[in-house]
């Protein structure tokens, strides 16, 4: 860390710390947003390739699904909608269970 501080204190490289071109990209901006129409690519077998060797021929246990998750994310508006839908389904299920419970108690 001290070596990096020396480099940044050098006048020739001081702009590196201030220049946004050299900043690390935020996590939420790093991934490409896709909408819910394409969410099947995360779990569909047609999109998953299994690799046994890497590009240099070394054995590896790796699949392309990991890359998909690394570079793509469902857009927030769609994921919020899907979460809302799942919450509504849970509420409906709870209401049905309560209705069944009352019916069983009466008989």
Image: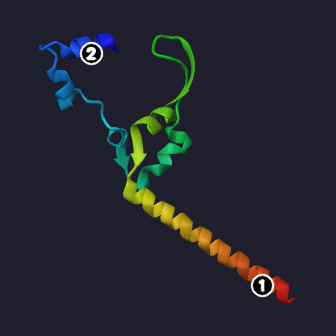
x%, y% of residue 1? 35, 15
Left or right: where 78 falls relative to 92: left
Viewer-side residue, 22 vs 72? 22
Residues tagged 2 and 1 counted as in contact (Cβ below 8 A): no
Left or right: where 4 falls relative to 52: left
| Residue that carries the numbered disc 1 in the rendered image | 102
Viewer-side residue, 29 vs 7? 7
Against 31, residue 96 (above or below) is below
x%, y% of residue 65? 51, 35
Badge 1 crowding class, 10 Å Cα cut-off, few under 14, some 14 to 19, many 20 or more, is: few
Badge 2 crowding class, 10 Å Cα cut-off, few under 14, some 14 to 19, many 20 or more, is: few
Q: Secondary structure at mark 2?
A: helix
Query: Residue 5's mark?
Result: 2
Viewer-side residue, 98 vs 54? 98
x%, y% of residue 16? 19, 22
Taking the spot 53% from the left edge, 11% from the top edge, the residue there is 58
Taking the spot 52% from the left edge, 31% from the top edge, the residue there is 49
Q: Quadrant of the C terminus?
A: bottom right
Separation (CA) of disc 2 from disc 1? 70 Å
The quadrant holding residue 22 is top left
Q: Farthest residue in the right direction?
A: 107
Q: Tell me which numbered mark, 2 or 1, is placed earlier along the sequence.
A: 2
């Amino acid at each position: 860390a001290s070596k990096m501080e020396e480099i940044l204190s050098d006048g020739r490289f001081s702009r590196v710390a201030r220049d946004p071109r050299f900043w690390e990209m935020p996590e939420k901006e790093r991934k490409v947003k896709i909408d819910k129409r394409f969410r099947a690519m995360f779990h569909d077998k047609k999109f998953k390739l299994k690799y046994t060797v890497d590009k240099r021929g070394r054995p590896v246990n790796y699949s392309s699904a990991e890359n998909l998750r690394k570079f793509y994310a469902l857009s927030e508006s769609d994921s919020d909608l899907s979460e809302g839908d799942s919450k509504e389904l849970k509420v409906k299920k709870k209401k049905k269970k309560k209705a069944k419970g009352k019916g069983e108690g009466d008989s």
